[in-house]
Image: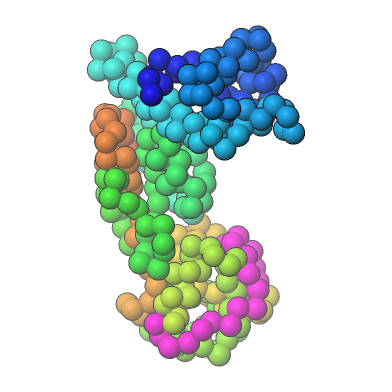
């Protein structure tokens, strides 16, 4: 199929998919509704299939329309990347960087890295996307991001694929959060997960990445954690612990970012759960000076930050 000759029509179809109607897509693209209809009709004639449901759901796409829009978004993003790279090479643009990150990284070391990066490259157009791990990798694959901060662990099914360049930044050991009057709150030596087998646990929502890591570690230690309350909000989790409702095991970054009175944070033994924090980028993407500098800056910032994570577990 010579779809490369129908890029404008594909762009129109993607806009219809995103906006939900011909009228909204026309407004978004600065076209008339008639022009939008003509572009779609031309695509349909070329493909000899219907792309838009004009009966029960006016403006909704058919299965074929959704498939073409999904691939079209990736194609358009790649073309935009190519234009950006050519302009950078020719010196017509200072560059851009679209960075995605999970929340606890944004609340700890990312702001420092952004400030340092901006000092060195003030002309680069810098944008930040705050999202959870499950969404960052698809956004990276679809060309919405140039670089992403993620974390990885064997317990997670959505580990980075082989199509990504990965730079390991640091390991983030999980910590135990206990009520101040808990029987283990006053100790100094690292705890064994099994010492908490009889406690009520404050855990993440079913399927949450961090609690899947914790649950797998508990199973390896020979028990299933008894979850009494669930939340993916680390401040909320620590508030539940402070109220004496249970114990929690959370990433070190979480307790470095949020400190809730009424809790005690303890280290775990070396065989406790941990996650590796990574900077990843598409392997086939242009290694722009901006993305390479950001990776270097993140490495520098997290090298000093690792001490802060360890110190948070000793307070």
- Name the spot of residue 51 as percent of width and height, x first: 58, 28
User: Is the residue 135 above or below the residue 217 in the image?
Assistant: above
Judge left or right: residue 183 versus residue 298. right
Judge left or right: residue 9 versus residue 62. left
- The answer to whether residue 143 is magenta is no
- Residue at x 40%, y 51% (from the top left corner): 150
Judge left or right: residue 64 versus residue 242. left
- Residue at x 33%, y 47% (from the top left corner): 279
Q: How many marks?
A: 0
- Name the spot of residue 145 as percent of width and height, x first: 42, 36
- Name the spot of residue 92 as percent of width and height, x first: 32, 11
The part of the image, by quadrant, that contains residue 53 is: top right
- Residue at x 46%, y 29% (from the top left corner): 72
- Viewer can see residue 81: yes
- Viewer can see residue 116: no
Judge left or right: residue 251 versus residue 57. left
Q: Is residue 315 or residue 265 the one in the foreground?
A: 265
User: Is the residue 211 above or below the residue 80 in the image?
Assistant: below
Q: Is residue 149 or residue 182 the one in the foreground?
A: 149
- The answer to whether residue 240 is magenta is yes
Q: Quadrant of the N terminus?
A: top left
- Residue at x 29%, y 45% (from the top left corner): 163
User: Is the residue 104 above or below the residue 77 in the image?
Assistant: below
Q: Is residue 304 or residue 150 the one in the foreground?
A: 150
Q: What's the coloring here?
A: rainbow
Find the magenta span and give its range.
220-241
The part of the image, by quadrant, that contains residue 242 is: bottom right
- Name the spot of residue 17 as percent of width and height, x first: 60, 30
Q: Is residue 27 or residue 47 the one in the foreground?
A: 47
The residue lying furthest to the front in this view is 48
């Amino acid at each position: 199929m010579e779809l490369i000759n129908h890029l404008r029509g594909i762009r129109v179809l993607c806009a219809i998919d995103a906006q939900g109607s011909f009228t909204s897509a026309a407004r978004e693209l600065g076209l008339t509704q008639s022009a939008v209809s003509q572009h779609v009709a031309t695509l349909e004639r070329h493909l000899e299939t219907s792309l838009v449901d004009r009966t029960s759901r006016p403006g909704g796409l058919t299965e074929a329309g959704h498939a073409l829009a999904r691939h079209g978004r990736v194609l358009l993003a790649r073309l935009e990347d190519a234009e950006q790279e050519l302009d950078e090479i020719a010196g017509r643009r200072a560059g851009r960087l679209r960075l995605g990150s999970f929340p606890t990284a944004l609340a700890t070391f990312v702001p420092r890295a952004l400030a340092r990066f901006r000092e060195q490259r003030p002309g680069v157009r810098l944008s930040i996307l705050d999202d959870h791990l499950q969404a960052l990798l698809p956004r990276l694959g679809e060309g919405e991001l140039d670089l992403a901060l993620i974390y990885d662990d064997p317990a997670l099914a959505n580990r980075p694929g082989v199509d990504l360049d990965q730079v390991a930044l640091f390991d983030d050991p999980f910590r135990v959060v206990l009520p101040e009057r808990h029987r283990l709150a006053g100790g100094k030596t690292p705890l064994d997960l099994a010492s908490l087998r009889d406690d009520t646990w404050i855990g993440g929502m079913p399927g949450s990445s961090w609690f899947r890591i914790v649950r797998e570690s508990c199973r390896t230690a020979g028990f299933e954690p008894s979850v009494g309350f669930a939340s993916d909000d680390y401040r909320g989790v620590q508030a539940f612990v402070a109220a004496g409702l249970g114990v929690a095991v959370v990433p070190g970054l979480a307790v470095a970012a949020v400190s809730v009175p009424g809790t005690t944070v303890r280290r775990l033994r070396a065989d406790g759960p941990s996650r590796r924090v990574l900077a990843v980028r598409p392997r086939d993407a242009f290694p722009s000076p901006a993305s390479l500098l950001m990776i270097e800056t993140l490495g520098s910032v997290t090298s000093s930050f690792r001490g802060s994570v360890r110190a948070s577990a000793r307070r």
